[in-house]
Image (spheres, grey):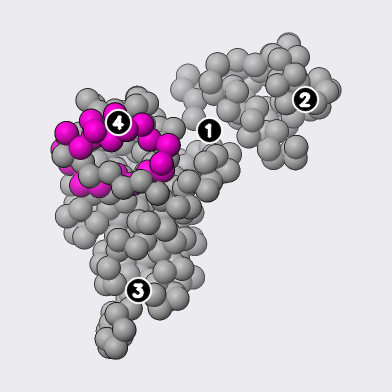
């Protein structure tokens, strides 16, 4: 197991329980206690946890894994979800993307689709404008798409959150209120049949809610591990969602509940 993989696992264990003992972690990862101590010391230097005498505790009141440590979780599922969503986008559309690992994969899938020519109708003339316009508040997505000449990238202003690279705040709101989207693709932290879709942070939830308000179609993308899970801040109810794209791990009863709420579910 590489250091990066160990760090991912340690942070996930810490996120689940709020605290972690050295010996417990060494047993779980099948490495020496000395290795775990070094890992915890390095993670503490990055302010990702707080060291204690026998292990570590979470850093701060609320805890959320930074994006760079979440990207390897459920990676194949996220790539399949992203490819399916990219195929639903028509040339010339304006697409909104909030931040997150799954929407980052969607951005990559869109870039590949509209660079390969598969998005064009055979025999049709090339569009006069950009092949696609993407509006995002995620700095990492903007950075990846900015080098794609066929895609017009629009970024919001705002204050950057280091965990997710998302821009939030009044400046973000000001830009989003001036745009109209054909479709928004939202990554979420939880989906509940009664409460709707949720995020860990209230400022990110409010921006995602505004994305949904500005779009004609709302597509939620999430792997099945987040189904039935609740997070702190509500984004919107299921009545605002047109389509939810997830993997085949979703329970049939959950699909039925979402269908009763008027949400179409696409599993890949």
Which badge, 4 or 1, comes first in the chain's sequence? 1
Q: Nearer the viewer, mark 3 or mark 1?
A: 3
Q: Is residue 123 above or below residue 12?
A: below
Q: CA distance from mark 4 to mark 2?
A: 36 Å
Q: CA distance from mark 3 to mark 4?
A: 32 Å
Nearer to the camera, 87 or 16: 87
Badge 4: residue crowd in 10 Å (few <14, some 14–19, many ≥20): some
Q: What segment carries the magenta color?
A: 239-260
Q: Is residue 253 above or below residue 124?
A: above
Badge 2: residue crowd in 10 Å (few <14, some 14–19, many ≥20): few
Q: Report which residue position mark 4 lands on.
A: 254
Q: Position of residue 132 (x, y in %)?
A: 32, 70
Decide if residue 165 is in sight here. Answer: no
Which badge, 3 or 1, comes first in the chain's sequence? 1
Q: CA distance from mark 3 to mark 1?
A: 35 Å
Q: CA distance from mark 4 to mark 1?
A: 26 Å
Q: Position of residue 49 (x, y in %)?
A: 62, 25
Q: Position of residue 212 (x, y in %)?
A: 22, 46
Which badge, 4 or 2, comes first in the chain's sequence? 2
Q: Position of residue 168 (x, y in %)?
A: 35, 43
């Amino acid at each position: 197991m590489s250091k990066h993989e160990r760090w991912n696992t340690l942070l996930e264990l810490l996120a689940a329980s709020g605290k972690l003992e050295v010996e417990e972690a060494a047993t779980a990862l099948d490495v020496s206690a000395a290795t775990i101590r070094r890992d915890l010391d390095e993670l503490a230097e990055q302010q990702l946890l707080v060291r204690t005498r026998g292990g570590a505790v979470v850093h701060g009141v609320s805890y959320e894994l930074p994006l760079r440590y979440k990207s390897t979780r459920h990676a194949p599922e996220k790539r399949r979800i992203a490819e399916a969503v990219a195929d639903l986008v028509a040339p010339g559309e304006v697409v909104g993307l909030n931040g997150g690992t799954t929407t980052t994969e969607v951005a990559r899938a869109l870039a590949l689709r509209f660079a390969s020519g598969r998005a064009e109708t055979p025999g049709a003339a090339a569009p006069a404008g950009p092949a696609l316009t993407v509006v995002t508040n995620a700095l990492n997505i903007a950075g990846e798409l900015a080098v794609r000449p066929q895609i017009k990238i629009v970024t919001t202003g705002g204050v950057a959150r280091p965990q997710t690279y998302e821009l939030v705040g009044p400046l973000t709101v000001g830009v989003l209120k001036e745009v109209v989207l054909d479709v928004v693709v939202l990554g979420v932290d939880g989906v509940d049949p009664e409460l709707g879709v949720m995020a860990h942070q209230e400022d990110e939830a409010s921006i995602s809610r505004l994305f949904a308000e500005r779009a004609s179609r709302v597509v939620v993308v999430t792997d099945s591990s987040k189904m039935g899970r609740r997070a702190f801040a509500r984004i919107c109810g299921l009545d605002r969602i047109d389509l939810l794209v997830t993997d085949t791990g979703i329970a049939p009863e959950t699909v039925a509940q979402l269908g009763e709420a008027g949400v179409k579910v696409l599993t890949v």
